[in-house]
Image (cartoon, grey):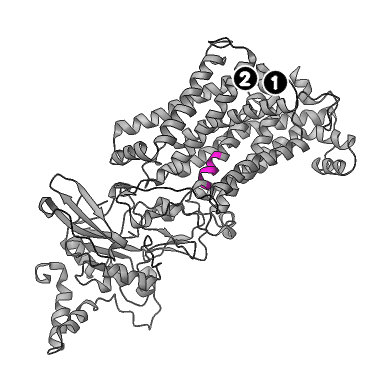
Amino acid sequence: MTAETPDGGVDRRGFLKDLLGACGAAAPVLWFGAVSVPELAAQDGSEPYDPTEHLYGMGIDVAKCIGCARCVVACKTENDVPEEEHFFNTWIERYVIREDGEVEVDSPNGGIDGFRPIRDDGEIRRTFFVPKLCNHCEAAPCVQVCPVGATFTTPDGVVLVDEEYCIGCRYCIQACPYGARYMHPEKHVAGKCTFCYHRLVEGKVPACVEVCPTQARIFGEVEKRATPLARFMRFNDVQVLKAHLNTRPKVYYANLDGEVR
Amino acid sequence: MQGYIYPNEFELHWGLLVVLYPYLTGLVAGAFILASLERVFNVKEVQPTYRLALLTALAFLIVAPLPLLAHLGHPERSYEIFMTPNSQSAMAMFGFVYAWYLAVVLLLEIWFDYRREIVLWAQSSDGWKRWMYYILTLGSTDLSEKALKFDDSVGRWITIIGIPSAFLLHGYVGFIFGSVKANPWWSSVLMPVVFLFSAIVSGIALVLVLYVVTTMFRWRKVDMKCLDKLAQFLFYALVVDFSLEALDFIHRLYESEESIEILRQLIESRLFISLIVLQVVMGSVIPLVALALVSPGLRKGGILRTPPELRQLIYIVAAVLIQIGIFSIRWNVVIGGQLFSKSLRGLTVYKVELLGIEGLVMTIGLLLLPFVILWVLVKVLPPWTDMDAQSAEPQPTSQGRAHESYQ
């Protein structure tokens, strides 16, 4: 699978290196070794993190997502997202498009509970999984509407919420076209994806990216040339969600179907 | 739930309390604009409602921010909206628009309008009442002709500033919704205008009911000239409001954007009662027809000649129906806009709680509170224009400004 996609170059090399290095080891160990490799530009800790040096985005290859929702679980664990249903920083949608054009979408518990077998398999035109998350829009409506400025964009392009400052008016939740925000049931402030900002400053990729077994999620610098994300965007036709709203998302989708909203 | 909604959309974020907020501010703006009819546009017939309308506006304005405050996740941080407002945010302007309207427009106008009487009441009452009125004079007890003329002219100017302010107060609430591009049910440039005209309608209707009820409870005769004029303006405002609503509807239907299918489902299933039955039929069409027939809106004396008692009853029924209709408008905007998914693939439901901070009991309490405040205000600052010497209320001399101007 990796051999056919041009964007997987570096990771394939990494994979082969691992394969040679771990010659004789058990296969599962190798496999996990390969997927936990992705790291951001070196943060050796000697210099403090400078957010102005970076601009982050995420690439998602819809064709690679297998709907396992390991990303959703990892995100909930990493970010203390409430365990219950209906609170997600990221979730997986399954699209089933029938021969007559009818579209069925579902996301049972964000995908964590797995997807039920599709009824009546015969008449399906196409079906696929779409990981969703905050798009960290360049022109973020949530940032615009926040009355006190508790929601803000960091210099490295990440949209965050200051939990000590948010008054809990929920205007940002209304303003987000992507349903990416929720009201935290205990903290009573807006909750959302942070691109795992606490990991970024340590040079690590977001948890969802790290655990994805098919590397459907690519994370990195939007503007620098020699990065996995830049490569992803060079070798794929990428689209963003709801482009007509001019929010200028920084989550870029490859192989995205027109039915996805 | 029906179809697909984003997982985070399960919880409906703005509930009954947020429905209440635009309803209350609408009444404030509407009542004030009614008051300005007399003061600025010299519609002398509605004079008996002038002060009542001002006090009504004040009573409702005091309550208006309470539902918002109660609905915040962190009400104790609400002052941040004044301290560090985000200049990009429509909602950040709330504090300033509100403070401007309360302090600069309403309180000042009421004070200048009542100052003469307050001084007289301070002189003629005793005990704590005397002190209360003295404090209310703010130390300004000059009743010379020059001073009274100044009061009158300042009051007039405040009203002139107040009209655009009232437009701002409620048009701005409409903008909060109308500017959310993520929501096709809200996102409309007409939203502030529709809000504004529905506010005028609701304000006039409320003052009309209050005027009749308070007059009856004081065993006085309702001034039919005043009532007819109110009904006439109510009719005109309703025509404009209904036309704007219809324009918005037709425009959406004609453009038939991506969202049209889900909005059709929304209206047909979730909003049928509140939109078609309550808002359009009961809240708009029936009052429109009734007012068109009996009020002097289309023909002097009404198309149908009716005895005053019957006409008064029809006005009251129409005004109450209009209130139900306007509340439904607020419901349909606020709740309706959250009943469909932004994926445009599904509908959700809203269940009103009975108790709890956003429940029905709280809402009814907040709806009644302005009337309690109004009752107190009316006790302190009687707005009546038909008081006589036997009245138990503190009584200004018969040369009061109010009295002069009705003759």
| Residue interval drawn in magenta | B17-23
Give left or right: position of B399 versus B76: right
Dot 1 alpha-carbon crowd within 10 angstroms: few under 14, some 14 to 19, many 20 or more:
some
Dot 2 alpha-carbon crowd within 10 angstroms: few under 14, some 14 to 19, many 20 or more:
many
**Is there CB contact under 8 Å for labels 1 and 2?**
yes
Q: Position of residue B234 (x, y in %)?
A: 56, 24
Query: Nearest the camera: A228 or A172?
Result: A172
Determine whether the residue tagged by mark 1 lies in a helix, strand or loop. loop
Question: CA separation, marks 1 and 2?
Answer: 9 Å
Determine whether the residue tagged by mark 2 lies in a helix, strand or loop. helix
Q: What residue is drawn where x is 70% and y is 20%?
A: B222
Q: For the residue marked with disc 2, what is the amino acid?
A: Gln
Give residue B312's mark.
2
Q: Position of residue A159 (x, y in %)?
A: 39, 62
Question: What predominant SS class does the magenta segment belong to?
Answer: helix
Residue A90 in which image quadrant: bottom left
Q: Which residue is mark 1?
A: B222
Q: Position of residue B90 (x, y in %)?
A: 49, 47
Q: For the residue marked with disc 1, what is the amino acid?
A: Val
Residue A86 in which image quadrant: bottom left
Q: Earlier in the sequence, mark 1 or mark 2?
A: 1
Q: Chain of mark 2?
A: B
Q: Is residue B38 magenta?
A: no
Q: Position of residue B242 (x, y in %)?
A: 45, 27
Whether B289 is drawn above or below A120: the answer is above
